[in-house]
Image: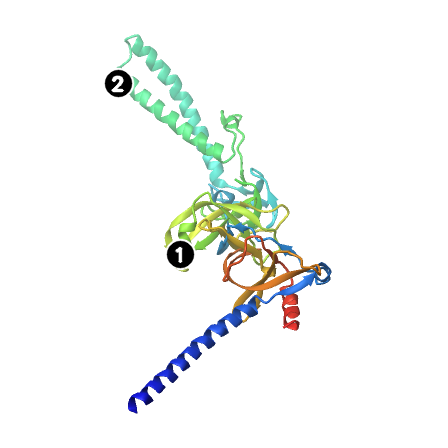
Amino acid sequence: MLKFIIAICISVSLVACGGKTSTKTESKKAEEKKELLTLSLSAKQLELMNIQLVQPGKKAIASYVYLNGKVSSLPNNQANISSDLEGKVEQVFVTEGNYIGRGQPVLTLRSMPLIELQNEYLNTKSEMDFLAIEFKRQTELVNSNVGALAQYQVVEAKYNAIIAKEKALRAKLETLGVNVNDLQTPQNAVIKKMITISSPISGYIHKLPVKVGMLASPQSVLAEVVNLSEMQADLFVYDKDLNLIQEGQTVDLDFINASVPNVTGRVINIERMIDSENKAITIHVKFSAPDKSFVVPGMSVRGAVVNPNDKELSYAVPFSALLKEEDNYYVFFTNKTEDKEGKMSFKKAKVKLGDKNEQMVEIQFLNAVTEDIFIVQNNPMILENERRKNQ
């Protein structure tokens, strides 16, 4: 009797387990059937719903790595203007914001050291002319075996030294814009009192901390000039993305907070040290500002770098083709085959998303589909509403 009762219990348990398995399988099938429920629509209905179809070819979607940073000027496109000699500001020719060409005057200084330097050059030139005559005389005496060799050597040394000094003073004066041809003789010398300070580069006057009568020294920054024709973006790259960056690579630049068109730049160098403040490595991207646009150092910029590892081919559709329900994504597709009533069958399929860019996204069908399908590329919610009506 006991054996009979045990056998009955085992049988009931097996039936119960089998029922649970069967219920789970049926639920899964029902879910798949729900997702693949057929919806039939005519060409006229598709037109009224503004439904468009696209065949999702397999392609590699290029994804982007986005890097944030700031605009800065190139080293050769920014200059501090100063004077080589001390002097008082006599006249200023520009104001902040003015565009100035290379070699164009910025200001003039009245300089006492300049007058003293020209006087020193005149004295040196006179001494050099005298020693030239004396050296010639000593050379003739030595060649005639009349003069002393020691005296000749002393004059030669003095003459060579004064030549070197004259050349050095000439170079200084030419650097200051003084024409040394006006200083050949003391009687006809034209002494210059003013130093003209010119811009070493073309660009915009950024700072001009001067006024007339101010005493300027060689350590004073009289003006700052910046050239905005070519600049660089300093972008920050973290460890995980560093292998995606290399010199010479192109980068799409977006000026986040400014209404300036995007531009394409090129990586000119990569720093070899991690910045202690933001814990990232800085890359420098050279670019040319768009015509008639206002791009200045300090502006925020975002760089987009194509991920070179995205080479796998997958189905790709526009974002407008996706239907999102909770945490799942779906698309509607058809093979364009018409039935007797001239209608096409559409099915709803669950998909998994892959790489994406700003326009397209890779999808992977979780159920097998044929190769010759067409995806609904817009208004999938309209089809979903229609599908629910027909359930």
Q: Give the amino acid at mark 1.
A: Lys
Given residues 249 and 271, the one toward you in this image is 249
Task: State whether residue 104 is above or below residue 233.
Answer: above
State the image coordinates of residue 365 (x, y, percent, origin top left). Answer: 51, 60
Can you tell which of label 1 and label 2 is closer to the viewer?
1
- Mark 2 lies on a secondary structure that is helix
State the image coordinates of residue 35 (x, y, percent, origin top left). Answer: 56, 67
State the image coordinates of residue 341 (x, y, percent, origin top left). Answer: 71, 61
Task: State whether residue 358 is above or below residue 389.
Answer: above
Q: Give the colour scheme shown.
A: rainbow
Q: Quadrant of residue 46?
A: bottom right
Q: Are marks 1 and 2 in contact (CB under 8 Å)?
A: no
Q: Residue at point 39% right, 25% down? A: 163
> Can you tell which mark lies on residue 126?
none
Q: Residue at point 66% right, 72% down? A: 389
Given residues 108 and 120, the one toward you in this image is 108
Q: Is residue 53 left or right of residue 15?
A: right
> Can you tell which mark lies on residue 150?
2
Q: Give the amino acid at mark 2.
A: Ala
Q: Is residue 242 visible?
A: yes
Task: State whether residue 146 is above or below residue 366.
Answer: above
Q: Is residue 148 left or right of residue 281?
A: left
Given residues 322 and 10, the one toward you in this image is 10
**Residue at the spot of label 1:** 240
Quarter that holds the C terminus: bottom right
Quarter that holds the N terminus: bottom left
Q: Is residue 390 left or right of residue 274?
A: right
Q: Residue at point 45% right, 34% down? A: 172
Q: Is residue 123 left or right of residue 52?
A: left
Q: Residues within 10 Å of mark 1 (few under 14, many from 20)?
A: few
- Mark 1 lies on a secondary structure that is helix
